[in-house]
Amino acid sequence: MSDKLNLLDLNRDEMVRFFEDIEEKPFRAPQVVKWIHQFGVDNFDEMTNISKSLRAKLKLTTEIKGPEIITEQISDDGTIKWALRLEDGQAIETVLIPDGERGTLCISSQVGCLLDCSFCSTAQQGFNRNLSVAEIIGQVWFAVRRLGSIRTTGNRSVTNVVLMGMGEPLLNFDNVVKALDLMLDDFAYGLSKRRVTLSTSGVVPGLEKLADRSDVALALSLHATNNQLRNELVPLNKKYPIEKLFPAVKHYLDSSKASKKVTIEYVMLKGVNDTPAQARELARLLKDMPCKINLIPFNPFPKTRYETSTQKDIDKFGDILMKKGFVVVTRRTRGDDIDAACGQLVGKVADRTKRQERRQRKIDVVELK
Ligand code: SAH
């Protein structure tokens, strides 16, 4: 690995400090941030408003290095999935979902995931490490550059970013918030706070810290109507049960200027959480929560024990909630022909938790009986 400082790792404040440290003027920071993130430049010679001597100085000790493309798959519905290689040879997945004028980029925050949600295929991969700032913002940097060169029909640029790829963003707090800084920075991507969504399975201390540090839109992976069922689907719930989680979410909304409602994500699992009685239970649970509800048809993956709810059951579930006054959107499944849909991102993870191995062993024991 290179020992040069990767400038993709720095938000604007850090860039200012960097230029001060090398005894250059702080105004160089916004200039360089602009070259990197707005113009997608990775070659210092293209930075024409930077003197030749400073460019030479930068080249000596720094670099601009994003992830490398391994594969690019384009779905029938226009969704694009990229597998991206990291410097240590592992891989993550990033997805662009075009929808009319909108282009939503779904990015990863970790290599694999520490959590073990029973319906998510990333969980099967285990966990290796957090992504660096360069690797998180690098996905946006990469996608914008790539779309610039392959744009064919329709609007395919990045207008929205969701942290809904691999990993739990609040368990990689420091790097995620710095990457968020760059997404919102007018000298970088200049996205409005409402167009950047952090999705969490409910890390309560992370939510509390986020309330002090950022103001992006929030999505909560709820998926269940009570602790008992949620413990099973999202095991993190045993540590941060609903009665601790909801006050933290409300606190975030109260302290946020931009996001007054949380998006409640609810994956529809046949016979598990999709009955009319559960819809009513969900309505009761959410009655004091400023929210909109996103029903996500379960996306199957190999060896899963779950099935997708029928369209009829999803409609019925949604209707009950709507009659109770909730805003309900059923997420259209996008890119499933290329395994780019929610919960289908896997990448290449050198698992340090030995999760797959442990599972395998458990299965062996069962089979021996
Ligand atoms: N760890 C974060 C972000 C990653 S998951 C979180 O839990 O929110 C992004 C969304 O996809 C979550 O709502 C997640 O629960 C959902 N998801 C995971 N696996 C899925 C699957 N197989 N089908 C449909 N949605 C899934």
Image (cartoon, rainbow, N blue to C red):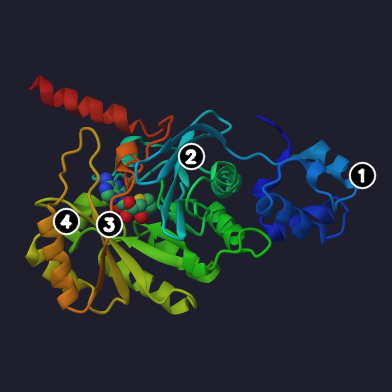
Callout 4, which amino acid? Leu
Where does the N terminus fall, quadrant-wise?
A: top right
In the picture, the disc for residue 229 is: 4
Q: Secondary structure at mark 4?
A: helix
Where does the C terminus fall, quadrant-wise?
A: top left
**Picture residue at 48% right of the left edge, 70% below the top:** 211
| C-alpha distance separating marks 3 and 4 | 9 Å
Mark 4 / mark 2, whichever is N-terminal: 2
Q: For the residue carrying disc 2, how many other residues have a C-alpha within 10 Å: few (<14), some (14-19), or many (20+)?
A: some
| C-alpha distance separating marks 3 and 1 | 55 Å
**Picture residue at 23% right of the left edge, 41% below the top:** 300
* Residue that extends furthest to the front in the rendered view of this protein: 153
Callout 3, which amino acid? Asn
Mark 2 / mark 1, whichever is N-terminal: 1
| C-alpha distance separating marks 2 and 1 | 38 Å
Does residue 316 appear in the picture of this structure? yes
* Residue 310, x across and y down, in percent: 12, 52
Residue named by callout 3: 237
In the picture, the disc for residue 306 is: none
Mark 1 / mark 4, whichever is N-terminal: 1
In the picture, the disc for residue 129 is: 2
* Residue 280, x across and y down, in percent: 12, 71
* Residue 116, x across and y down, in percent: 30, 44
Q: Secondary structure at mark 3?
A: helix
Q: Secondary structure at mark 1?
A: helix
| C-alpha distance separating marks 3 and 2 | 22 Å
Residue named by callout 1: 53
Left or right of 153, for residue 328: left
**Distance from mark 1 CB to nearest ligand 1 atom below 8 Å:** no
